DNA sequence: CCGCTTTGTGCAAACGTTTGCACAATTAGA
DNA sequence: TCTAATTGTGCAAACGTTTGCACAAAGCGG
């Protein structure tokens, strides 16, 4: 740590503390504490309370929550771990979380992993050092050493968007299964039969559930996909999507009627790949995504996708965190937030 | 605060502390501290150091940084205040900041204001209570009570993307003036003369600089814009952009040749408004944005805009923060990061 | 008017570090 | 061999809260 901060400015150094307010009001500092932190034990007369509050306000007293945390062993801060905040899925979740937690006095510590699990482990350890009251994990794998670590550390954990295989953590997730089923039914209803898919790694619950949603419906219709119509991305980005789509299109075979992508970014990449291959979307190839991130309604062609209610997910996660912090018994419930089909130009009705 | 957390889990309660490591290694806990925090005063023999480290590792010691913060009066955490993380401009900045600060042991506390200055003031006060070492402010107004507050509180502040009128805070901003000049020159070079603008509130440095960039170039060419070609948004969102554009198009006059928008989201709204009015972009009306946020290259039509190097801005801001935390004299330097013109389909060459 | 409850306030410990100071042990210089 | 410098470690205070406990004052029922 190179930053040696010895001196501090005046304002920082001469910070008003409880004792200052106390002497200025002629009471003991413990009394000030009780006035300013209602809910603590020990009743205070209204007269004193008013007076102390007035003095505190006048002196511009700002409580030192670090000191309070030290005493109470609770920082009222919670961590949010994501791979990359620039992925537009995450910010609305942060907003939802803040909406619930901020009024309760919680602050949110954001940690980006950059898709690197070593970094992620480090982030967790640092959050542990900082005594966060809980962690929201948006990177959860089906078998997850990070989850394990949090459990070992005794940090309340809530999984968002994803869930472990054993469902041993509380979680708030999108109903990927339902969403993908609805989408697949629509694809079939519109007469598509030669379907290709670009899937996420199958060590993620989202990746697995979305794929299962597709397969379920295909199976209902007595269909299965041939190997060569199934490709994977390593993580969900447009570049990865473009690469994957290229491998679908480059083969000697004719292009599929539709490419169902595991999410919108991947679908964007797929659209690029189609364009590059001289194929028109949706005339030559239909494309679908998942998430309904901002602007996919404005792209060319407007993307058919499934909307997750991300802010709702964030809010639900926030509430769940509050519940878990309050109670002793964190029942690992999994809450599913409904998904919503959004039909746009990138997928057409072959029957129409 | 409703959450009464009395009991804690085993793991949380029986946390290993310095003293535990000390007794286990047969040394005083101050020695352990010195071993684990190299750079502190007092040299330790290599033998003891190795031994203590081993014991600490074995016991799984996690330093309690709250306690350390209490002692040192420095939390190694910094705040980032934005209006709304869902605005795609901010995440890359966060990434840049983290990239620089995280390796130095800093954590980032994110605060969304929801465009509400009362909330914003509250966020600042809470960050002050939490003893953040510094604050990045991305909401800076030309005359800003928030900046004033931070100065009163003695919290090191760095303005990002925006700057105060008096330039009394260190800041890292995009070169809006240069960027907008370049764009305007291009617009003129391509033969557009009937130009309309959708501007941001003029109490923001970005709003004012971008407008000045346009005016400068127009003035160079002996042009000025008539009142009815100038409209404003309250803040930078697609909805606001759509409203503003509507008011430009609804008038009895013919539509302008080009609408220059203060940023991409606003431009998106303007495109929507044009479509709704039955106007083709770019054939009937050209549109430009600013920022080059993700996906504007994919929308219909692809948006002509100016790229800010957001992650660079974040990194520069992070470095600047480190510098200011280190030194006594925070010279309020303003760093400008170059902008880059990005020409796409939404603006056409009338001469071509 | 007496004991008992209630109410309001002060006292002091504790939270887990960091670090100035003291001091013992070792090394070096002459 | 003696003094002086150096090195390694222990001691204890301090950081600013919260909160259990003690206790005085006041209210009250009989």
Image (tube, coloured by chain):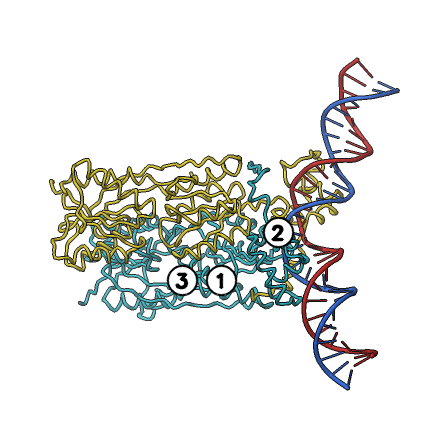
Chain colours: A yellow, B cyan, C blue, D red
Q: Which mark is residue B103?
A: 1
Q: Which residue bears the numbered disc 2?
A: B17
- Left or right, B215 with respect to B50, comes to left
Q: CA distance from mark 2 to mark 3?
A: 38 Å
Q: Position of residue A98 (x, y in %)?
A: 46, 44
* Residue A114, image quadrant: bottom left
Q: Is residue B276 visible?
A: no
Q: Nearer the viewer, mark 2 or mark 3?
A: 2
**Residue under the image location 59 percent in, 56 percent down:** B55
Upstream in the sequence, badge 2 or badge 3? 2
Secondary structure under the numbered disc 2 in the rendered image: loop
Discs 2 and 1 lie in a common subunit: yes
Upstream in the sequence, badge 2 or badge 1? 2
Q: How many marks?
A: 3
**Residue under the image location 18 percent in, 41 percent down:** A187
Check disc 1: other Cα within 10 Å, few if <14, some if 14-19, many if 20+. few
- Left or right, B153 with respect to B232, comes to right
Could you tell me which chain the residue with mark 3 belongs to?
B
Q: Which residue bears the numbered disc 3?
A: B311
Q: Which mark is residue B264?
A: none
**Nearest to the observer: residue B315 or residue B5:** B5
């Amino acid at each position: 740590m190179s930053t040696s901060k010895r001196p501090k400015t005046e304002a920082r150094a001469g910070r008003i503390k409880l004792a200052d307010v106390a002497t200025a009001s002629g009471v003991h500092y413990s009394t000030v504490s009780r006035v300013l932190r209602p809910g603590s034990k020990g009743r205070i007369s209204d007269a004193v309370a008013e007076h102390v509050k007035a003095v505190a306000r006048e002196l511009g007293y700002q409580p030192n929550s670090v000191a309070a945390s030290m005493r109470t062993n609770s920082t009222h801060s919670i961590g949010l771990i994501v791979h990359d905040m620039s992925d537009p899925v995450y910010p609305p979740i942060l907003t939802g979380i803040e909406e619930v937690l901020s009024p309760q006095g919680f602050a949110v510590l954001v940690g980006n992993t950059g898709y690197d699990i070593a970094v992620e482990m480090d982030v967790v350890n640092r959050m542990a050092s900082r005594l966060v009251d809980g962690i929201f994990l948006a990177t959860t794998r089906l078998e997850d050493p990070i989850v394990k670590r949090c459990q070992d550390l005794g940090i309340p954990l809530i999984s968002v968007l994803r869930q472990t295989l054993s469902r041993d953590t509380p979680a708030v997730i999108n109903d990927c299964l339902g969403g993908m089923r609805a989408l697949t039914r629509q694809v079939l209803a519109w007469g598509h039969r030669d379907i290709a898919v670009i899937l996420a790694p199958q060590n993620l619950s989202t990746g697995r559930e979305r794929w299962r949603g597709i397969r379920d419906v295909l199976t209902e219709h007595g269909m299965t996909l041939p190997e060569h119509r199934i490709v994977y991305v390593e993580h969900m980005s447009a570049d990865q999507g473009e690469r994957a789509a290229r491998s679908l299109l480059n083969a000697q075979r004719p292009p599929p009627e539709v490419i169902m992508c595991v999410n919108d970014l991947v679908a964007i990449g797929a659209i690029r790949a189609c364009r590059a291959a001289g194929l028109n979307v949706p005339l030559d190839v239909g494309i679908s995504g998942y998430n309904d991130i901002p602007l996919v309604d404005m792209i060319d062609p407007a993307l058919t996708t499934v909307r997750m209610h991300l802010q709702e997910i964030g809010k639900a996660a926030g509430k769940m965190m509050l519940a878990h912090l309050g109670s002793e018994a964190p029942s690992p419930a999994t809450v599913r937030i409904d998904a919503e089909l959004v039909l746009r130009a990138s997928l057409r009705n072959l029957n129409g």
